[in-house]
Image: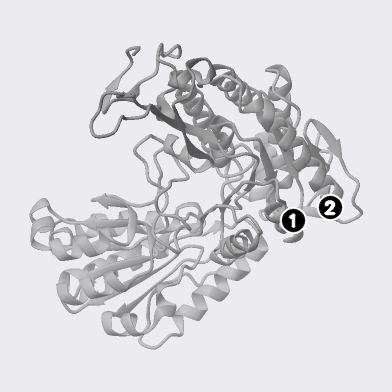
Amino acid sequence: MIKGANYIGDELSAKGDKTFTTFNPQANKVTGWTFHEATKSEIDAAVLLASEAFNQYKKISGKLKAQFLRTIADEIEALGDALIHTYIKESGLPIGRAQGERGRTIGQLKAFAKLLEEGSWVEATIDAAKPDRVPLPKVDMRKMLFPVGPVAIFGASNFPFAFSTAGGDTASALAAGCPVIVKSHPMHAGTGELVAFAITLAAKKTGMPKGVFSNLNSSGNEVGQQLVLHPNIKAVGFTGSFNGGMALYKLANERPEPIPVFAEMGSVNPVVVLPSALNEKGIDWAKQYAASIMLGAGQFCTNPGLIFGIKSTSLDNFIKTLGTEIATLEPNCMLHPNIHGNYEKGKEALSIQGGVNVVADYESEVQPNYARQKVVTVNGTNFLKNSKLHQEVFGPFSVIVRCEDATELSTILKALEGQLTGTILGSEDELRKYENVVEALKSRVGRLIFNGVPTGVEVCPSMQHGGPFPASTDSRFTSVGESAIKRWVRPISFQNWPQEFLPDALKNSNPLGIMRLVDSKNTKSAI
């Protein structure tokens, strides 16, 4: 079923001579599938189709676009075991993770479909004319959100379903009314091709314009660079490394017409363990965090890579228990030999920094591509003066920082780079007592957690998955949840526009029956 070709709209194309294969990290060998990299002409053809499709797709009703998204979900599910087995073969992840992530992907598509069916997401705002206002008449002003145009989406290595071909970026962009061109991740190109087949089939079944979706293969940077620089691409979605995200961001801003790049570039997700958590539940929290660090071989952007505490006997006991617990857990397979190699280099580079001491280091023999977990500790002074200790190590690795007191802890948190999440473990009374610590952490994160673990991202309207730079390129937006749709739209105002020519969402009669802000009041009533 896997052809190794690109989807240019609903047609398979393999014009290029440059090919690559995917890799099975569990078996430590290539999968046997060969993929053709997209050529310049294929990229241009995909973007041209997307541009032509946009002229039609942006006018299609929310209900029909919702039907398209629901059909994508149905077609992904219809791929059955073939899709799951391909995912496992290319990622080394277990079947439970594959099934769970497929469920999340299907759920995201259906959530955006529901959003479209309700319709109020366009934020229709009306300020009616007041010709008798003095000293000057008030004009009629109406505003709503509109899609920006064709979008380029880059698949993520660590989520072959949920952040890739039909993941949250694609689902939200299609929901917004933007055609999507996916630059498939080379580590799971076969999985991507199967999902692309499901999307193109859904587009045909629901009568969507040809070119509303394309899927391009590439093992290097050239295809992605050409996509971002193409004048007809109007926005970019990316989940991955800091270097990769910043390279795309710089390219996009060097264009004659700069475009937004919504890049989520990782995080060390600081955790602050306050005294009551150490005194009352230190052993329990140590066990939970050992499991959280190890979850998915540490290959989550929300992995707890930094843990802070104020030095005490209780903190010493917490560190000892965490080290003991994590050393008993069996290592897991990483996504690819390259990712495993980078993990080994990264953890060793941080381990040799001044003042760093090893808490736990799994030293037994493991299979190829399996990640040996490691936890180290350092005092606050050394952490503050060495920014290398702030860096993310993508894998089951964490740094525990012993702070002298709450003042040093606040100082360290203020000096941290932007993060996706920050966690406070403690009591409600301590939230008052350590208000400066809480405020310092809040200023650096997009999601603030109380008495929990950062791994696990709920897909819901109130989720914020994004944070201050360098966690993401724009902390105002999320890549998870229904609000992710706002990345792919822009507002347009209509002044004194005739009723007949207004979008339905802005007409006096409110034919869509949506919630609107009319003269500063939320209402579904007609004017």
Question: Between residues 521 and 450, which one lies in front from this camera angle?
Answer: 521
Residue 192 position (above or below residue 302):
above
Q: Quadrant of the N terminus?
A: top right
Check the image and name the residue furthest to the bottom: 354
Nearer-the-camera pick, 94 or 69: 69
Identified by mark 2, the residue type is: Lys
Q: Where is residue 110 drawn, in percent x and y?
A: 51, 25
38 horizontally vs 133: left or right? right
Q: State if disc 1 and disc 2 touch (CB < 8 Å).
A: yes
Q: Is residue 381 left or right of residue 246?
A: left
Residue at (27% x, 74% y) in the render: 412
Picture quadrant where residue 436 is located: bottom left
Dot 2 crowding, Cα within 10 Å, few <14, some 14–19, many 20+: some
Q: Check disc 1 and report its element: helix, strand or loop.
A: helix
The quarter holding residue 423 reads bottom left
Residue occupied by mark 1? 226
Question: What's the colour scheme?
Answer: one colour
Categorize mark 1 by other alpha carbons within 10 Å: few (<14), some (14-19), many (20+): some
Counting from the top left corner in percent of width and height, residue 197 is at 74, 31
Q: Of callouts 2 and 1, which one flags the residue occurring earlier in the amino acid sequence?
A: 2
Q: Residue at x 84, y 52 (%)?
A: 40
- The kind of residue tagged 1 is Gln
Q: In the picture shown, does residue 277 fall above or below 522?
A: below
Query: From this viewpoint, is residue 312 visible?
Result: no
Note whether residue 58 is visible: yes
The residue singled out by tag 2 in the image is: 40
Instruction: Tell me the number on the disc at residue 278.
Output: none
**Looking at the picture, how far across and down is residue 394, in whole percent?**
51, 64
